[in-house]
Amino acid sequence: MPPSRTFDAIILGGGAAGLMCAAVVGQRGRRVLVIDHAGEVGKKILISGGGRCNFTNRDTAPDRYLSANPHFAKSALSRYTAQDFLAMVERHGIAWHEKTLGQLFCDGSARQIVAMLLDECAAGEVTVETGRTIGEVAHADGRFRIGGDEAPALVIATGGPSIPKMGATGIAYDLARRFGLKVVEPRPALVPLTLGGDEALFRELSGVASDVVAGAGKARFREAALFTHKGLSGPAILQVSSYWRAREPVAIDFVPDVRPGWLLDAKRLRPRALPAAVLAEQLPARLADRLAERLALAGPLNGCSDKALAEAERRLSDWRFHPNGTEGFAKAEVTAGGISTAELSSQTMGAKRVPGLYAIGEAVDVTGWLGGYNFQWAWASGWAAAQAL
């Protein structure tokens, strides 16, 4: 029985990357089908940025992405920039604002971004089908077939398994392996870390946040860290979680703005002051109390030896936590790892060994920092693939 419909490209996944790719391909005059198993497209877009969608970052640069090949993202990011996407946002009359660290958000709702992408798809006469199970993907004679539909090109844009309650799955990796593509082991990224053992005592500080410098490996981020009932979260922790590896420590500088010798200076100037009170000038009071307790700084400063205060300074600027894990894909904003970049062309996002097969967005082993970087990779990789379709 002949296929009921023929397209130039079938895109699996109606998220940021898939819709962007579809819109651009459709407007190039190609017949495009987007298939998404969810009831509506763009579900992750809708919940991002507290519902206002941190849709890109002005400071986008390749060094803000993790990948087994740190150079892979350069081509796509240089050809479709944050300014290019912002121009589309402004063309659609969407009001936006910039927060800290180059992050751009909608003034209104993330639904405006989804509506914009669907309008762009409509302009290219793209067929978008939601609530449709992908099922078996057949490949023969240079054609990809799904159900009664076929095309010479197939784009994997199904994302990663982060936030499974939104319907996220690892289908991208199943498809990649089906076509013989290697997959870099997926793991949760931009995810809270959990504490156990002796460090579980810090869970009593649940809800306390402080401006810190957090580090894992060679990565360092200055933002807020938040104590939770399970461990550590907040922007600084989410950032370093992408770099953290099991059994490695996370280093926290609780006092990034003080100069060396600040506790010794306090002892000379205010010998009767309590250490926790001095720490509370730099930190939330509850955190200051807990840290003073852990440092065994009891009684007034003049009762603490210079050696003990110097050691306290050192530990406060390089406090080592030893997470026992993460909160997993359920709480991860994105997935690190994915379809190996060694299998793909950085120019076209096409599979080197399977003509007509492409992979874009979060499905690929390219993971951005927190703050709009992953959306910019979705837009850029989707655009790059679209140029080749």
Image: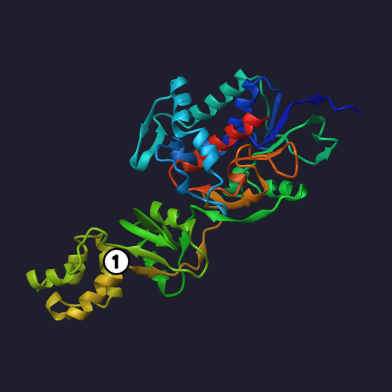
Vertical placement of residue 96 versus 369, above or below: above
User: Which quadrant is the C terminus positioned in?
Assistant: top right
Q: Is residue 203 left or right of residue 246?
A: left
> Residue 209 location, x and y as percent?
33, 56
Disc 1 target residue = 317
Q: Is residue 6 left or right of residue 115?
A: right
> Residue 85 location, x and y as percent?
48, 29
Q: Which residue does the image show at 47% across and 58% down from the upper left? A: 241
For badge 1, the amino acid type reads: Ser
Q: Is residue 77 visible?
A: yes
Q: Is residue 15 visible?
A: no
Q: Which residue does the image show at 38% across and 65% down from the upper left? A: 251
Q: Is residue 389 left or right of residue 375?
A: right
User: Which quadrant is the N terminus positioned in?
Assistant: top right
Per the image, label 1 sits on a secondary structure element best described as helix
Vertical placement of residue 183 versus 385, above or below: below
Q: Which residue does the image show at 64% across and 21% down from the upper left? A: 28
Of the pair 243 and 298, the residue shown nearer to us: 243
Q: Please identify the residue farthest to the right as the structure is shown.
A: 1
> Residue 121 location, x and y as percent?
61, 23
Of the pair 173 and 381, the residue shown nearer to us: 381
Vertical placement of residue 378 versus 222, above or below: above
> Residue 76 location, x and y as percent?
55, 38
Q: Please identify the residue farthest to the left as the structure is shown.
A: 269
| Tag count | 1
